[in-house]
Amino acid sequence: MARRGSDTSTVIGLIMGFGGMLLGFLLEGGNPLGLVGVSALIIIVMGTLGATTISYSLREVLGIPRLMRQSMRRVSGPSPQLAQQLLEFAEKARRDGILSLEDTVEDLEDETLRKGLRLVVDGTESEILVEVLESDLAIVEQRRLEEAAIFETAGGFSPTMGIIGTVMGLVLVLGRLGADTKELGRSIAVAFIATLYGISFANLIWLPIANKLKNQVKQFRLEKQLIIVGVRSIQQGESPALVKEKIEGFLEERDKRALDETRSD
C-alpha cells in the first residue's frame, strides 16, 4: 500500500511562488493593493472554467476541487510494508499451500491485492491473472491521467483569458482618452492585471497541479505493478527469497533497508 498523508510540497510551492512574486513587487516599491483586481479575477476564473467546461463536461469540471485536495495528499508509491505483506503471503502459500490464503483475502484493504489473491486461490492461469490485473490497472491509470489533463487544459486557457481581460481593459482605456493622465495610467495598470492573473494561475496552480497528479499516477502504477509481480510469483509457487528479489526492484534504497530490517527481526 502507498504511504499516504498530507503532502506539504503543494502548499509550500504555492506560498513560495506567489510569495516570491509579491516580495519582488514590494522590493520595487509596489503597493500590494495595486495587484488587486476583482474584475480581472472574475474574467480569468470564470473564463477559464467556462472554456474548460466546453472542453470536458460539467461533472468533470465540478470534480476540480476534489482533485485539488487530492494533489495535497502524499502518495509515495511502493512501501516496504506492502513488500513484507507479499512475502508473508508467499511464505504461507509455500508452506501451507495456495488455498491457505483464502481466509485472509477478503480482509485485505488493497483492491488489486485482494482481487489478485482471489484469482490465485481460484486457480486462475498465470497469463490470465496478469492480463486481468494489468487491464484493471490500465483503466484506472487512464481515468486518472484524464483528470490531470483537465488541469493542463485549464492551464492553457488561463493565459489567453488574461490577454482577453487585458484587451477588454484597454478598450475601456481608449474610450477614456480625454480623461486625466493619472486616471488613464491607473486604468492601464488595472488592465494588465488580467494578464498577470492569467499567467500566474496557469504556471502556479493549473499546470503544477496537473504535474502533481500525473506524478501520483506514476507512483500508483509502481505500487500496482509490485503487487502484480508478487501475486504472480505466489501463484507460480516461487520461493520467498526469489519473490523478494523480484519485488525489491520496485523499492527505493531506504525502503529496501527497512524491508531487510523487518525480515531480520
Image (cartoon, rainbow, N blue to C red):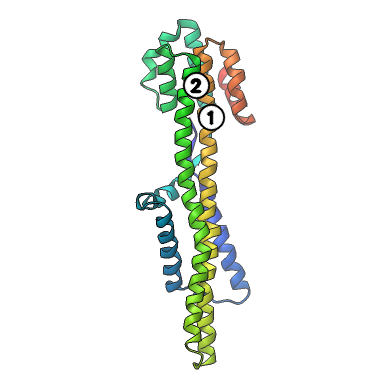
Q: Position of residue 131 (x, y in %)?
A: 48, 23
Q: Earlier in the sequence, mark 2 or mark 1?
A: 1
Mark 1: give few (<14), some (14-19) or many (20+) Cα within 10 Å: many
73 vs 94: above or below: below
Is residue 261 or residue 246 the one in the foreground? Answer: 246
Q: Position of residue 265 (x, y in %)?
A: 56, 18
Taking the spot 37% from the left edge, 22% from the top edge, the residue there is 107
Taking the spot 47% from the left edge, 38% from the top edge, the residue there is 142
Q: Position of residue 110 (x, y in %)?
A: 42, 28
151 vs 2: above or below: below
Residue, disc 2: 130
Mark 2: give few (<14), some (14-19) or many (20+) Cα within 10 Å: some
Taking the spot 37% from the left edge, 51% from the top edge, the residue there is 57
Distance, label 2 to label 1, CA atoms, is: 21 Å
Q: Are marks 2 and 1 in contact (CB under 8 Å)?
A: no
Q: Quick check: can you spot residue 265?
A: no
Mark in the foreground, 2 or 1: 2
Q: Quadrant of residue 258?
A: top right
**Res 79 label:** 1
Q: Is residue 93 left or right of residue 264?
A: left
Q: What amino acid is found at the position of numbered circle 1 in the picture?
A: Ser
Element type where label 1 sits in the image: loop
Is residue 137 or residue 91 the one in the foreground? Answer: 137
Q: Is residue 125 left or right of residue 246?
A: left
Q: Position of residue 261 (x, y in %)?
A: 59, 22
Q: Quick check: can you spot residue 259?
A: yes
Q: How many marks?
A: 2
